[in-house]
Image (cartoon, helix red, strand yellow):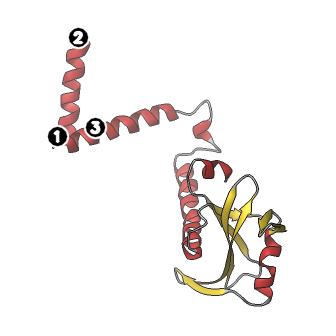
Amino acid sequence: MKESKELGMEYIGKLRKNLIVEYFGKKVKVEGLFKRDFEKEKLKLRTINGIKFRLSEKVVNIPDVGRVKIVAVLMENQKKPKYLVSTNHKKKAENIISEYMKRPKIEEKHRRDKSILDVEGNYLTSEKSNIGFVRFIAMVSNCIEYLSHKYGLSFYEVIKECSKELIKKGFS
């Protein structure tokens, strides 16, 4: 979270309930921060993508990170709330929840792709992987796509012209 904030990137993720944060100068656990809201039913009722949520939000300071927005979310079928955090403290709670809900779909796609490719673990960062070749092919494909749009040629015509130029330069 700290690295993404330093790079200016937005981070949205789940937060541990026992993390200590600063709220109006006092150090409190995240769970204790929202305890009163849940006891007194001071929660907003929202429906996002057909799912009913009860939520409460607060802007706090996390040491070494800075100001963040924490959203306590209680779904209609759950007993305990989830605590979501966003480094963009001005973002609406509903948007934080909807973006967090997209993550399982993305992670599911990665798992499915790994099973289709028969890749185990973190294969792409291992020494045996061919990620360099994959990146090279992607870069070449993007260059050809750019040239075809720039000059109004088809993908095949760009490859044909590039091949001619490479052959000329290679033999001269």
Residue 84 lies, with reference to residue 138, above or below; the image says below
- State which mark lies toward you, 2 or 1: 1
Q: Quadrant of residue 93?
A: bottom right
Indicate the secondary structure of the residue bearing disc 2.
helix
Given the image, on which type of amino acid does mark 3 rest? Ile
Given the image, on which type of amino acid does mark 1 rest? Tyr
N-term-proximal mark, 3 vs 2: 3
The answer to the question of whether label 2 and label 1 lie on touching residues, with beta carbons closer than 8 A, is no
* Residue on which disc 3 sits: 144
x then y, percent, for residue 104: 59, 64
Indicate the secondary structure of the residue bearing disc 1.
helix
- State which mark lies toward you, 1 or 3: 1
Given the image, on which type of amino acid does mark 2 rest? Phe
Write the residue at 66% across / 81% down. 55
Q: Is residue 27 left or right of residue 120?
A: right
Q: Which one is in front, 8 or 107?
A: 8
* Residue on which disc 2 sits: 171
x then y, percent, for residue 39: 80, 87
Write the residue at 28% across / 42% down. 145
N-term-proximal mark, 2 vs 1: 1
* Residue on which disc 1 sits: 151
| Tag shown at residue 11 | none
The answer to the question of whether label 3 and label 2 lie on touching residues, with beta carbons closer than 8 A, is no
Indicate the secondary structure of the residue bearing disc 3.
helix
* CA–CA distance in space, label 1 to label 3: 11 Å
Residue 155 lies, with reference to residue 76, above or below; the image says above
* CA–CA distance in space, label 2 to label 1: 26 Å
Q: Quadrant of residue 118?
A: top right
x then y, percent, for residue 153: 16, 41
x then y, percent, for residue 77: 69, 84
For the N terminus, give its image quadrant: bottom right
Dot 1 surroundings within 10 Å: few (below 14), some, or many (20 or more)? few
